[in-house]
Image (spheres, grey):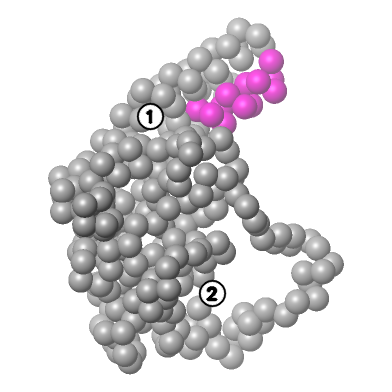
Amino acid sequence: PARYLRHGAQPEEEPAIKDTPMLHPFWAAGFSFARGHFAYRVPYDCCLPFVFMGEEISIGIRAWTHGYDLYAVESSVLFHEYAKMSSRRRKVHMFWEQKRSAADTGHESLKRLTAIIKMAPDVSDYDHTDENKYGLGRVRDVELFYKLFLIDTIHRTSTQLCKFVKTGVMHRAFTPYIQTQLSQGIDYSQLHDFDTAKAIKDELDSHWRPQARHAIKRALEMNQIGWLRNAIDVANRAELKSSDPELLQEAQN
């Protein structure tokens, strides 16, 4: 069955890369701008009715295979107020209010979406309408995207990439391969052997885990419950459980 990948939102933080946009693997519909040929080459799929969550990964992967590189601005210039409890929002009708009558339609749309980007290799019985127009590009192989960004389409698993992306590790590792003389994007053919999992582990070992250990030890010494809660949060994000389980257990007790 179809199953799409949904990426979350990142809280506002001090940017790791200064004075230039930061390279990212994913595309966000809420804030996107590019030259007009982007919309021409990577148009919204005409045949995905009742898809709300999912079009971002479709556009992003298709764009990447067409040779586009995706960047995030250094700081936010606009935002969307979700305000789930807002009385203003509750008055706005959403299309998924009709989901009972459109459940089958939405399911068929997701089958098409995931099959076209090869995220659901076991799906073949989907709507093939204008697939060439709304399909993958020929500049980059989609399988390389899944390899570099640790997405297993067979077992349907993915790896959290924040420690690779928002730290600037991806940006620093990949941007040296920008084809400046050709006025083109990154030459990903030079990155077939790049080990993203190792890059994440190196980032954890060199920065995140030492900070987490220090935070926990300091909180324990000071016997401050509030500090300890914050330190445990840092430790969880640093995946300290796999490297220092005893220290994390001491903090949790």
Residue 170 lies within the magenta run: no
Quadrant including the C terminus: top right
The answer to whether residue 78 is left or right of residue 74 is: right
Q: Is residue 210 visible?
A: yes
Identify the magenta region.
Answer: 224-235
Q: Residues within 10 Å of mark 1 (few under 14, many from 20)?
A: many
The answer to whether residue 229 is left or right of residue 134 is: right
Q: Residue at x 40, y 43 (%)?
A: 165
Which one is in front, 151 or 242? 151
Q: Label 1: state its secondary structure.
A: helix
When asked about the image quadrant of residue 201, the answer is top left
As drawn, 230 above or below 102: above
The answer to whether residue 161 is left or right of residue 53 is: left
Q: Which residue is drawn at 44% across and 61% down?
A: 27
Q: Which amino acid does label 2 sit on?
A: Phe
Q: Can residue 162 be seen in this view?
A: no
CA gap between label 1 and label 2 equals 34 Å
Q: Which of marks 1 and 2 is nearer the N terminus?
A: 2
When asked about the image quadrant of residue 196, the answer is top left
Q: How crowded is mark 2: few (under 14 residues within 10 Å), some or many (20 or more)?
A: few
Q: Where is residue 23 in the image (x, y as percent from the top left)?
A: 39, 48
Q: Residue at x 20, y 43 (%)?
A: 194
Which one is in front, 104 or 16? 16
Residue 225 lies within the magenta run: yes
The residue to which callout 2 is attached is: 52
When asked about the image quadrant of residue 68, the answer is bottom left
The residue to which callout 1 is attached is: 204
Q: Where is residue 141 in the image (x, y as percent from the top left)?
A: 20, 64
